[in-house]
Image (cartoon, rainbow, N blue to C red):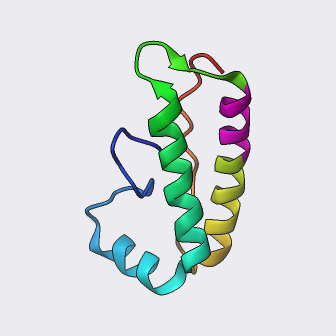
Amino acid sequence: MNEYGARMPLWPQDDPRLVALVDEFVDDVLTARLHAWAEVFDQHFHHERGWDDRRVAAAHRVEGEALRDTLAAALPAPWHVDLDYWETLGA
């Protein structure tokens, strides 16, 4: 899930078990993709107006779904990955 100013869109961010899993199982390429995905949100989604470009919004949604699947494959059981895609205004 994205949140304004959150560089790593994984929650709960304050759970030390999640931090340890990310450190152990999420490689640099996936980490960079997660950071880039959060950055696109920060640059293109406004809390009142929504997305500034429908094409960016559509690509962001597709990448979010791909990130969900890639992250789920990277983390061991019993961890489960959900995508909470709330940023649909203007999409």
Image position of 42 with respect to 8: above or below: above
Image position of 90 with respect to 12: above or below: above
> Is any atom of residue 80 visible in this view?
no
Would you say 25 lies left or right of 18 here? Answer: right
Q: Residue at x 67, y 33 (%)?
A: 56
Question: Foreground residue, 16 or 8?
Answer: 8
Question: Foreground residue, 80 or 88?
Answer: 88
> Is any atom of residue 70 visible in this view?
yes
Percent x, y of residue 13: 32, 60
Q: Residue at x 73, y 44 (%)?
A: 62
Q: Residue at x 58, y 47 (%)?
A: 83
Image position of 77 with respect to 3: above or below: below
Would residue 61 be counted in the magenta stretch? yes
Q: Report the magenta residues as a range.
A: 55-62
Percent x, y of residue 35: 49, 58
Would you say 18 lies left or right of 67 here? Answer: left
